[in-house]
Image (cartoon, helix red, strand yellow):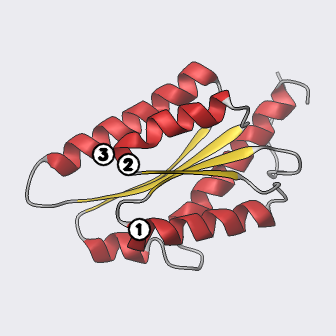
Amino acid sequence: MPEIAGAADGRGIKVGVAVASFNAFVTDGLLQGALEALTAGGAPEPVVLRVAGSFELPVAARALAEAGCEAVVALGAVIKGETDHYEHVATQAIAGLQQVALQTGVPVALGVLTARRADQARERSLPGPGNKGAEAAQAALQAATALRRLRGG
């Protein structure tokens, strides 16, 4: 079988963005980076669905996939505190997002930051080439483009 790859072409690809409101000082920057990357990639305006926190991202991602999105970008920030809560939320949110992708066949790009300190998360959400929201959006477009080509679209 020939290799299916190439540059992402977002034209006509319906993208959903699920973003956690918790740790908005980080997630707002991730969202801005994702939106800019989607625009640069030629994608139409995405559907943005806000949820309370990263733990709620899998159900939002599934709803976006079931609503006809060809790709989903999941954005959140889980920052370590003094308890084990951080590990449980991060592990379950990420596992849930993977399950959504596998069950629906819709790529779900992981833009959920897990950081030991707030400044580490904030640094990865600032404008510029290190913005992890932008990276997740680019990955979503690339995956959706490859799947579209595979399926003959």
> Which residue is depicted at the point 27% across and 44% down?
89
- Discs 3/2, front: 2
- Could you say where residue 21 lies in the image, as x and y percent from the top left? 42, 59
Q: Please tell me which of labels 1 and 3 falls first in the chain.
A: 1
Separation of marks 2 and 1 at Cα, in angstroms: 11 Å
User: What is the quadrant of the C terminus in the image?
Assistant: top right
> Which residue is depicted at the point 21% across and 51% down?
86
Label 2: which secondary element? helix
Q: Mark 2–mark 1 contact, CB under 8 Å? A: no
Q: Mark 3–mark 2 contact, CB under 8 Å? A: yes
> Which residue is depicted at the point 46% across and 36% down?
58
Separation of marks 1 and 3 at Cα, in angstroms: 16 Å
Answer few, some or many: residues within 10 Å of disc 3's Cα (few below 14, many 20 plus, some between 14 and 19): many
Q: Is residue 1 left or right of residue 76?
A: right
Q: Please tell me which of labels 2 and 1 falls first in the chain.
A: 1
Q: Which amino acid is tagged 1? A: Ala
Q: What residue is pinned by disc 1?
A: 24
Answer few, some or many: residues within 10 Å of disc 1's Cα (few below 14, many 20 plus, some between 14 and 19): some
Against 62, residue 20 (above or below) is below
Label 3: which secondary element? helix
Separation of marks 3 and 2 at Cα, in angstroms: 7 Å
Q: Which amino acid is tagged 2? A: Ser
Q: How many marks?
A: 3
Q: Which amino acid is tagged 3? A: Ala
- Could you say where residue 149 lies in the image, as x and y percent from the top left? 86, 32
> Which residue is depicted at the point 36% across and 69% down?
121
| Residue 3 in sight here | no
In the image, which disc is placed on residue 54?
Answer: 2
Label 1: which secondary element? helix
Q: What residue is pinned by disc 3?
A: 90
Q: Is residue 32 left or right of residue 20?
A: right
